[in-house]
Image (spheres, helix red, strand yellow):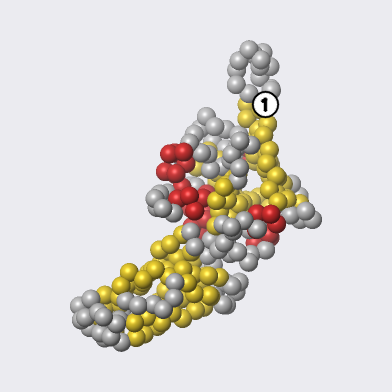
Amino acid sequence: MKIIAVRNAHTNAEFHPTVHVGYDPVTSELSVSFQLPAPTDETTAGNPGVTLIDSVVVNLNVLRARYDWCDHQVYFVAATKSLPIFALYPETLTSRESAQDYARRLRRNLLVGINVPLASSSNDELFVTVNLNELATDANIQVNEHCSLTWSDANSSGAVRALLLPHIQAAAPATMTADSSTTIELRVEDATGNLIQHPATVYVETVSGVVPFARVAVTGGLAVVPVSAAGLSAGDKVRVKFGWKYFPGADEVLIAVV
């Protein structure tokens, strides 16, 4: 499994864990453990080598059965057993807040993320991000033999996701006449602009104009969406947004009505 570590300048420099990530392809279990220096108090005074250790095991097959498993999703494993694994995008959807603002508001550390490109992605196509602080070194992350570790030059795990999770590209004619119909072409691409062959579901939000459905199945990275300017007049604009189940507005088209 691909593990991508980043040095995030916004992460508290005093929160300086060592993260261990392991993957077992036989059981589909991802294990994450965190080591933190023990606080200086009466029980550890004079023994600075003592550490506090916490760990979480995530069965990816069980994770796939959750209601929020979908295209373009990320689950976070917090640095404590008291907080279960949670999906980020359903929690930030209503307020449209950034991951950084969300973490600050709820005082959650978005340390280790399990990133799901598409619901049909294999376990090998998932990737894990580890959001360390800007002082982190190789000593702050360890992986087992079934994981490949790389350091990203991105300044946050969110920037890594923005690059590596699938992209929606929508294209439409610049103009259409009142009460006419046309089509919008959709592409679901990877970071290099290649079409993603896995099936995907793109969600449609019609601001103005008429689209006959709220979501579209994408096959081989391509789909066509019909749109009508019924009821609109010259000078109006057809506006249609496209996104994922919990991540709307990834792309949009504007068509001038003439």
Q: Nearer the viewer, residue 161 or 249?
A: 249
Q: Quadrant of residue 136?
A: top right
Q: Is residue 257 above or below residue 70?
A: below
Q: Quadrant of residue 48?
A: top right
Q: Quadrant of residue 31?
A: top right
Question: Which residue carries the number 1 mark?
Answer: 51
Numbered label tally: 1
**Residue 152 placement (x, y as % from top left):** 55, 50
Q: Is residue 186 above or below residue 132?
A: below
**Residue 40 placement (x, y as % from top left):** 60, 17
Please give the name of the residue rendered at 79% of the width and 56% of the height, measured from the top-left corner.
Answer: 26
Please give the name of the residue rendered at 39% of the width and 77% of the height, measured from the top-left corner.
Answer: 211
**Residue 143 placement (x, y as % from top left):** 70, 45
- Kindly identify the amino acid type of the residue bearing the numbered disc 1: Thr
- Left or right: where 91 falls relative to 115: left
Q: Is residue 169 visible?
A: no
**Residue 86 placement (x, y as % from top left):** 57, 47
- Left or right: where 237 falls relative to 134: left
Please give the name of the residue rendered at 46% of the width and 68% of the height, measured from the top-left corner.
Answer: 203
Instruction: Kindly state the secondary structure of the residue where label 1 is placed.
Output: strand
- Is the residue marked by circle 1 packed among few (<14), some (14-19), or many (20+) residues within 10 Å? some
- Left or right: where 161 falls relative to 62: left
Q: Classify the position of the C terminus by image quarter.
A: bottom left
Residue with the most extreme right position: 26
